[in-house]
Image (tube, helix red, strand yellow):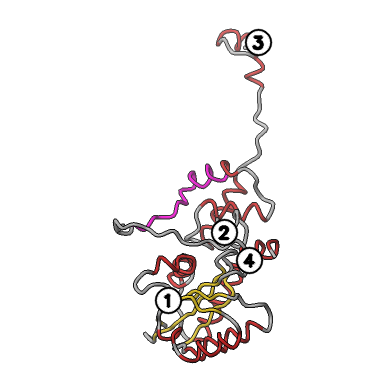
Amino acid sequence: MSERRACAALGLSRAVNRYRSGRSSDEPLRAQLRGLAAQYPRYGYLMRHGLLKSAGQVVNRKRTYRRYVTEELQVKRRHRKRLDRPRQPLPVPLNANECWSMDFVSDRLSSGRRLRILNVVGDFTRECALQVVDYGISGARITHALAQLAESRPLSPVLLCDNGPEFTRKAMFLWTKARGIRLHFIEPGKPIQNAFVESFNGKFRDARLNQHWFVDLPEARSAIAGWRIHYNEVRPHSAPGYRPPAVFARNAA
């Protein structure tokens, strides 16, 4: 039977019968999403879309999301208990380098030995300015690391921290006073007042500490340094419009 007679019998337009989709195959995008899922298992679709967009691979966020769902790459949520208590508004800095937040994260090596990491984060840019990894970190060790950092970039005039013994010792007090830096302490037992670095700590633990088992201190330092470069220079951050914090900081300077 000819095409004309077959289409007439079915009540189908010959134009519809001859139509061929002009859409490009989504397999390259799916492969890239699967690759990112293997490399960054705790990144959601917005983070993965930001990485692909920065590389010029995609533009449409909805298309990325459809393929993300089709491939079943959703990140499993970790449910936390919610406490019913009033929240105090956190002052948000309006300029880069206006305030930095500091806090510690703990982990263990494969041998069971305790490891401590000091994180210093810019509250406005969300850039991780400094990470110190060691078995133990004293107030003098913090001041030495900050002094080394000051040789390559200006320090913030305000350092926000909790009331831990490392931050309240004489070494920190004398060093910050000599530098003209003000230490601002949060209220005891209220980590929400140090929310910027607490948020960073959660991302750091989720993406690096929970994904790796360090054998020794040099390996831990190397892996954490590599992640910090990725976080600052590559990983899109939601606060600065899904741009890497270091890129946002350079544009805001």
Q: Earlier in the sequence, mark 1 or mark 3?
A: 3
Q: Residue at x 50, y 83 (%)?
A: 133
Q: Find residue 96 and name its label.
A: 4
Drawn side of residue 17 relative to residue 78, left or right:
right
Distance in Å between CA atoms under marks 4 and 1: 22 Å
- The residue singled out by tag 3 in the image is 4
Q: Position of residue 216 (x, y in %)?
A: 47, 86
Closer to us: mark 1 or mark 3? 1
Q: Quadrant of the C terminus?
A: bottom right
Quarter where residue 98 is shown: bottom right
Precedes in sequence: disc 3 or disc 4: 3
Residue span colored magenta: 64-79
- Estimate the x, y position of residue 203 in percent, counting from the top left: 47, 65
Q: Which residue is mark 2?
A: 237
Of the residues shown, which amino acid type is indicated by label 4? Ala
Element carrying mark 3: helix
